[in-house]
Amino acid sequence: MKNLRVLLEECRPKQWIKNSLVVVAPLTSKSLFESSTLISTIAIFCSMCAVSSATYFVNDVRDREADAQHAKKRRRPIASGRLSVHVAYIGIAVLLSVGLAMAAIVSIKSLIVVVVYLSLTTAYSFRLKHVPFVEIAIVASGFVIRAFLGAIAAEVPPSSWFMASIFAGSLFVATRKRYAELTGVEDTGRDTRKVLSFYSRTSLSRTSRLFGVLFVLTYIGWCVEVGPLGSTATILRLVSAIPLGAAVLRYEKQSEGQLGESPEDLLTEDKAMKLWGTIWFLCVSISLYIA
C-alpha cells in the first residue's frame, strides 16, 4: 500500500488539472453531454493522465540529481530515494501501455496526437529543456495539444481563436513560472535549471505581460466568433473576459513568490483565482447552454 501511494505521488495527480483542457472543444461545441462524446472525452482524459504521468517519471529519473538539490523538488519520490529508478521504469512502461491503448480505442487520430505529445515531451526531457525560449514554447504547446486532442476525440472542429487563446495563455503561465524560478535562484543561489541563466527577470516579466494581454485579446476574438454580435449569449461571453482578465492580473501578482513555480498549486489553492475561475465558468456555461 505504501508503494502504491509513492507511485501515485510520482504520477503528480495535481498536474492532471492540465488535462481538463480536453473538455474545452466538446464543451464549447455543445456536444459534451452527448453519450458518445462524453465517453470519448473521459477516455482521452484518462489517456492523457497516464501518458503525462509517464513523462513525469521520465523527467524525474533524468533530473534526480539536480532535483535533490532543490528546496521543494528534493521531496519528490525519485529524488528522495523513496522510489527506485528500476520501479520507475516499470511505472513508465505500464502508464504508456495504458495511455496509448486508451487513445487507440478512441480513434487512430487521437493516438497520433498523443504520440506527438509524447514525442515533444520526451524531446523536452532529453534535450529541448536546455534550449532557451524553445523550451517555453514546448511547455506551452503541451496545453494546445491537449485542447486539440479533445476536439479530435470528440470529432468537433477546433476554434482557431480559442486555440490561439490557449497558446497565449500557456505562454503567459510558462514565462511566469520561469520568472518565479529565476527569482528563487537569485534569492537562494541554487541554480537547478541551467536554462535560467539565459533569462532575466525584466525580460520574463515584460514577455509574460505581453502574453497575458494577447491571452485576453484572443479570447475576446473567440467570444465574438462563436455567435452573432448583440445576442445575449455573445454579451455574456464578452462579460466573461472580465473575470478572465482579473485572473490574469491575480496570477501575475501571486506568481511573484515561490508559489509561481507550481502553477497547479496557484490555480487550485489561491481563493481569488478560484473565485474568478468560477465566475468565468458560470458566464461561459450560461452563454453556451442557457442563453
Image: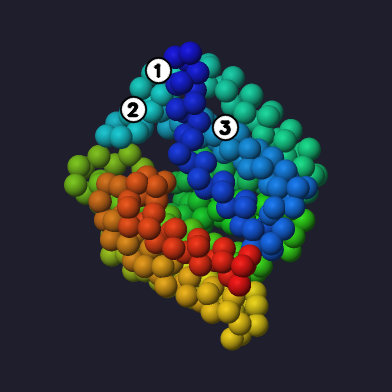
Question: Who is closer to the viewer here, 12 or 121?
Answer: 12
Residue 103 in the image: x percent, y percent? 73, 40
- Image coordinates of residue 255 in percent, x first then y, are 31, 55
Residue 240's place in the image compared with 80, above or below, is: below
Q: Residue at x 45, y 21 (%)?
A: 6
Earlier along the polypeptide chain: callout 3 or callout 2? 3
x and y percent of residue 278 in the render? Answer: 44, 58
Name the disc covering residue 82, or none.
1
Which of the 4 image quarters holds residue 279? bottom left
Q: Residue at x 40, y 17 (%)?
A: 82
Callouts 2 and 1 close, C-beta under 8 Å: no
The crowding category of the residue bearing disc 1, from other C-alpha atoms within 10 Å (few below 14, some 14 to 19, many at least 20), is few
Q: Which mark is residue 75?
A: 2
How far separated are the C-alphas under marks 2 and 1? 9 Å
- The front one of 270 and 111 is 270
The kind of residue on which mark 1 rests is Arg
Q: Which residue is drawn at 43% across and 59% down?
A: 277
Find residue 76 and report its horizontal and vertical position in percent: 38, 28
Mark closest to the chain's N terminus, 2 or 1: 2
Image quadrant of residue 132? bottom left
3D distance between C-alphas at marks 3 and 2: 18 Å
Q: Mark 3 points at which residue?
A: 54
Work out whether 50 lies above or below 111.
above
Which amino acid, by three-letter code, is at mark 2? Arg
